[in-house]
Image (spheres, rainbow, N blue to C red):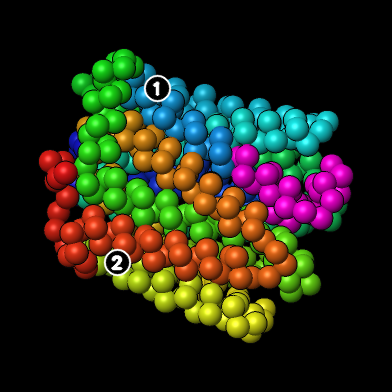
């Protein structure tokens, strides 16, 4: 096992470690996916009408999630992982409860922004904690196993949100998110040790930040795979933003959304589990590049079907499931490749990469979602463009040598 030291997380076994980081990362999926079935009810309660304004419930969270990652990365490299992780989870918990009590759409969006900021800390810190403890293909395996557990959230979250709406109004969903956040905060405070080496502590100064920023953005693999991941994530967020309207207005079956979304998430989980079994034998690049090519084929088929007016529910669901399988296979390897050369500045690197990826993806997803016009054409076209652009970025990053197995070096530029 390639690890930072013999006992990378003392007192916490490997399975418990993977489960913990996955459940922490799940705060993001729960905060997004549980809300999608409630967007129609929120629009009615807040008198938003039938337009695309409801999508800001998702977009505001993602914007806060993306923008705050720089702050948490700097703090994590200066003060350690554990205290900053606990503080960010506490903010997530309080913001969720504030959203449940929001008196207006403005205050709901403000609470969602704060909730996203708290979730940003959870994401950055778990990425840094994993990199503190593991490297290389072993890190990719941990990412994939955590991704499998993490994907239980999007599988059940829409159905859970729909179930809550059957017995309570939409604020109850936020109460549930707050309770989940409180439980995870308590578990982390009780069991997770500090994983950062004392020698890796970095002062929060402008020169130090500039040096870490230069290393992160100046490394070809770090920057290239961050941008590729941003493009595919942006396509996925475009689907999340539009999903409630797609099923309600295009297919006229809003109650089927949780089941179809869960099926797509199962495909993502299957891809992550398959990746965990194959990555140490085939390598991150072969799997990531194959998945990206598959994503382009699927998204192109979706665009062709939509433009030609053959967008039936079954066809849409099958192609979407295929795209999500490819997305799941690509994501774990993409993140591992981008973080591989950043071990000694893992916190700052994770925050810079997350800032670029999430903020860019939020804008891409919002652009796609806001162009919803009652058809699948904007969504399908957005998927295709993002996939092709992602492959172009990867090809440039690898200097045309796709499907290779070469190791990443910190000195690559």
Left or right for 272, reference 185: left
Along the line of sight, the residue nearer the viewer: 371 or 5: 371
Tag 1 secondary structure: helix
Name the residue beneath numbered marker 2: 289
Name the residue beneath numbered marker 1: 75
Q: Position of residue 30 (x, y in %)?
A: 61, 48
Report the residue at 42% width, 70% height from top: 295
Which residues, given as a range, are shown in magenta?
Answer: 35-61
Quadrant in the picture for residue 40:
bottom right
Q: Is residue 222 visible?
A: yes
Tag 2 secondary structure: helix
Q: Position of residue 81 (x, y in %)?
A: 38, 27
Within 10 Å of disc 1 (Cα), the crowding (few <14, some 14-19, many 20+) is: many
Report the residue at 82% width, 46% height from top: 48
Q: Main secondary structure of the magenta part?
A: helix
Report the residue at 67% width, 61% height from top: 372
N-terminal label among 1 and 2:
1
Left or right for 163, reference 196: right
Q: Quadrant of the C terminus?
A: top left
Q: Magenta span has 45?
A: yes
Left or right for 108, reference 182: right
Left or right for 304, reference 251: left
Quadrant in the picture for residue 93:
top right
- Marks 1 and 2: which is nearer the front? 2
For the image, the number of numbered tags is 2
Report the residue at 31% width, 15% height from top: 205
Q: Position of residue 10 (x, y in %)?
A: 32, 34
Quadrant in the picture for residue 215:
top left
Q: Magenta span has 253?
A: no
Circles 1 and 2: CB distance less than 8 Å?
A: no
Q: Is residue 274 visible?
A: no
């Amino acid at each position: 096992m390639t690890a930072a030291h013999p006992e990378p997380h003392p007192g916490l076994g490997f399975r418990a470690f993977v489960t913990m980081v996955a459940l922490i990362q799940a705060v993001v999926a729960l905060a997004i996916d549980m809300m999608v079935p409630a967007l129609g009810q929120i629009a009615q309660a807040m008198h938003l009408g039938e337009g695309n304004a409801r999508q800001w419930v998702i977009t505001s969270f993602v914007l806060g999630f993306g923008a705050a990652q720089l702050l948490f990365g700097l703090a994590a490299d200066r003060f350690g992982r554990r205290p900053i992780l606990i503080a960010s989870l506490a903010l997530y918990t309080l913001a969720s409860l504030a959203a449940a009590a929001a008196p207006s759409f403005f205050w709901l969006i403000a609470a969602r922004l704060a909730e996203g900021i708290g979730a940003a800390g959870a994401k950055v810190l778990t990425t840094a904690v994993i990199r503190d403890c593991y490297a290389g293909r072993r890190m990719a395996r941990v990412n994939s196993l955590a991704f499998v557990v993490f994907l239980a959230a999007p599988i059940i979250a829409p159905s859970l949100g729909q179930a809550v709406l059957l017995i309570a109004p939409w604020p109850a969903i936020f109460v549930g998110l707050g309770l989940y956040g409180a439980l995870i905060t308590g578990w982390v405070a009780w069991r997770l040790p500090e994983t950062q080496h004392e020698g890796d502590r970095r002062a929060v100064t402008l020169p130090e930040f500039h040096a870490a920023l230069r290393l992160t953005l100046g490394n070809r693999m770090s920057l290239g795979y961050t941008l590729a991941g941003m493009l595919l994530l942006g396509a996925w967020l475009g689907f999340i933003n539009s999903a409630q309207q797609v099923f309600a207005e295009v297919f006229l079956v809003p109650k089927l959304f949780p089941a179809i979304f869960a099926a797509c998430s199962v495909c993502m989980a299957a891809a992550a589990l398959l990746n965990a079994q194959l990555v140490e034998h085939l390598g991150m690049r072969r799997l990531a590049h194959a998945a990206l090519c598959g994503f382009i084929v699927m998204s192109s088929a979706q665009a062709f079907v939509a433009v030609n007016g053959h967008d039936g529910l079954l066809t849409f669901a099958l192609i979407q499931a295929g795209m999500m399988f490819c997305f799941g296979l690509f994501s774990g390897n993409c993140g591992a490749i981008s973080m591989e050369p950043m071990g000694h500045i893992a916190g700052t690197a994770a925050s810079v990469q997350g800032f670029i990826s999430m903020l860019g993806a939020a804008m891409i997803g919002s652009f796609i979602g806001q162009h919803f016009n009652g058809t699948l054409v904007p969504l399908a076209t957005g998927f295709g463009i993002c996939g092709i652009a992602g492959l172009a970025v990867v090809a440039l990053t690898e200097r045309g040598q796709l499907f290779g197995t070469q190791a990443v070096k910190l000195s690559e530029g």
